[in-house]
Amino acid sequence: MHEINLVLLGLIVLIIGLAVLLFFNEPEIFVDKEVEVIIALGTGLLILMLNRRADSKIHRVIHKQHELIDEIHRKLHEQHELIKRMQDTS
């Protein structure tokens, strides 16, 4: 979350800088470079958001797999106890 805040802050600062350059009619090369940086930061923000969303989905899948493995372990333990009792009685 901290990275997203930094990217948003940088994006806001660059947009304000672009507005100031446009207001004072600065040379086009500065404006072009700022626009490129703004596009790059916007793309980086999009990648960060998609990465966070993917991490959340992966975490849910891992949690479900962990519950399934716990259930299998519990059943195996019950079967082992049952086999031990059957051996003790015979």
Image (cartoon, rainbow, N blue to C red):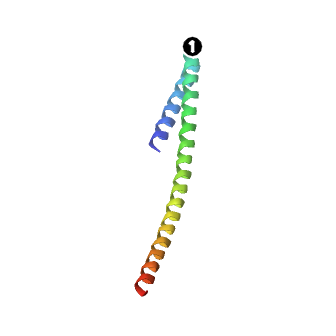
**Residue 62 percent location from the top left of the image:** 51, 56
Where residue 67 appears, as percent x and y from the top left, is 51, 64
Q: Residue drawn at (58%, 32%), measured in percent from left and top?
A: 43
Instruction: Determine whether 5 is above or below 68 in the image.
Output: above
Quadrant of the image for the C terminus? bottom left
Q: Residue at x 42, y 79 (%)?
A: 84
Q: Which residue is mark 1?
A: 29
* Horizontal and vertical percent position of residue 75: 50, 72
* Pick the front one: 38 or 78: 78
Q: Residue furthest front?
A: 90
Hey, what amino acid is under mark 1?
Ile
Tell me if mark 1 has few (under 14), some (14-19) or many (20+) residues whose alpha carbon lies within 10 angstroms of its own: few
Please count the marks in the image: 1
Q: Is residue 43 above or below residue 82?
A: above
Determine whether 62 is above or below 23 in the image: below
Residue at (45, 83) in percent of width and height: 86
Q: Position of residue 2 (x, y in %)?
A: 44, 42
Furthest residue to the left? Answer: 88
Which image quadrant for residue 77? bottom left
Against 62, is 33 above or below? above
Q: Determine the image quadrant of residue 50.
A: top right
Observer-nearest residue: 46 or 51? 51
Residue at the spot 57% in from the left edge and 13% down from the top edge: 29
Q: Between 67 and 29, which is closer to the camera in this rendering?
A: 67
Could you tell me which secondary element the residue under label 1 belongs to? helix
Q: Nearer the viewer, residue 86 or 68?
A: 86
